[in-house]
Amino acid sequence: MADYRSREHTAQVPSDERQDREKAFRKGTLPILYCSPTMELGVDIAELNVVNMRNVPPTPSNYAQRSGRARRSGQPALIFTYCAARSQHDQHFFKSPARMVAGSVAPPRLDLSNEDLLRSHIHAIWLAETGQSLGKSLIEILDMEGDEPSLALLPGVMHQIEADAAQQAARERAASVLRTITELEDTDSLLGQTMQNIVQRFDGACDRWRHMYRSARKQVKVQEKIRLDQSRSLRDKQQADRLRREALSQIDLLTNVETIAQSDFSSYRYFATEGFLPGYSCIVAGCHGVISKGEMDALWYRFSTLKPERQRRPAERYKIVKRA
């Protein structure tokens, strides 16, 4: 019997483990990988000969990237795609496959006059000029001391980011960058509005983290009180135990610096999610929440409202198979 073991290859898998799976896949000891678009981004598996996409990719460029994982060393390869019956997107390309398979790849476009995007880069310039590191987690810049921590920015952090010299240097450096963007009509106004109260906006970007942390701590205390209350029923205590574990899991998700590197709560990724710093995607009016599933740890879920047609589609996965 052939070995049909398979593993996941997504951004949720820790980097070291993902690399180990790629090595095993290259050697043939792991014959199947179930992948999110992480496998699009330049991962070279020379002998790959089968790619199975579970849904039609968003654009021809995505299709080219995913199908291009195969036959990189010139060998024949099998590439096939499932088209979901209830997906208008998939059915459109099922009826007109040439538009996807042989479609022209549109060059990427970026609106350099996008003020939200520019502000996040001005913020990044300012943060660099202050010399303040955000560390791995927000617990490295917030006051976490005591049973009821204030969660205010640490005095040392405030001293660093309030420095007038850093503000002036950031203004000059950002102004020189903005002058290169010909699409902008009033760079001085944009820069002035962005730099005004920038320390307060930085502090405000921490508020959602603070709210989630305080809510989780409160949940732990409330449910612990129920668990120890001898007048409560067994069912109440079991539910309290479950809710307490979920709250502890959320606290761990927010604060565990050893595993937070792959989390949306790592400091730089968190500030990018809040729109304060630039990130890989430009999420506008997103909804954020922590969900739990069975006994799994709390998961971070992001739901972008930029492309409503994509919200109804299932999470993208495609399978790549290497002959053992």
Image (tube, rainbow, N blue to C red):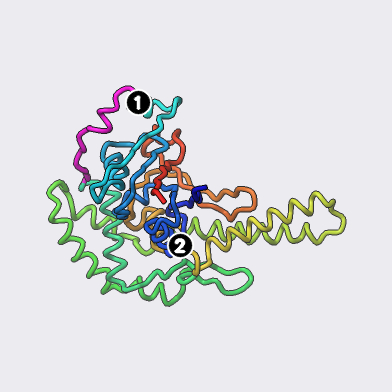
Q: Left of 213 or right of it: where is 72?
A: left
Q: Residue at x 36, y 51 (%)?
A: 39
Residue extending furthest toward the front: 1
What is the magenta range?
A: 93-111
Mark nearer the N terminus (2 vs 1): 2
Q: Is residue 189 magenta?
A: no
* The image quarter in which residue 126 lies: bottom left
Q: Secondary structure at mark 2?
A: helix
Residue 161 screen position, x and y as percent: 35, 71
Q: Which mark is residue 17?
A: 2
Residue 153 horizontal/vertical position (percent): 46, 69
- Tell which of 61 and 108 is nearer to you: 61
Residue 62 picture location, percent across and down = 30, 41
Looking at the image, residue 112 sits to the left or right of residue 220; the answer is left
SS category of the residue bearing label 1:
helix
- Tell me if residue 43 comes above or below residue 319 in the rendering: below
Q: CA distance from mark 2 to mark 1?
A: 36 Å
Numbered label attached to residue 23:
none
Q: Position of residue 169 (x, y in %)?
A: 22, 70
Residue type beneath disc 2: Glu
Q: In the figure, 323 relative to 270: above or below?
A: above
Kindly report the secondary structure that dominates the magenta region of the rendered protein.
Answer: loop
Q: Magenta stretch containing residue 108, yes or no?
A: yes
Residue ID for mark 1: 94
In this view of the protein, which residue sits in the foreground, 223 or 39? Answer: 39
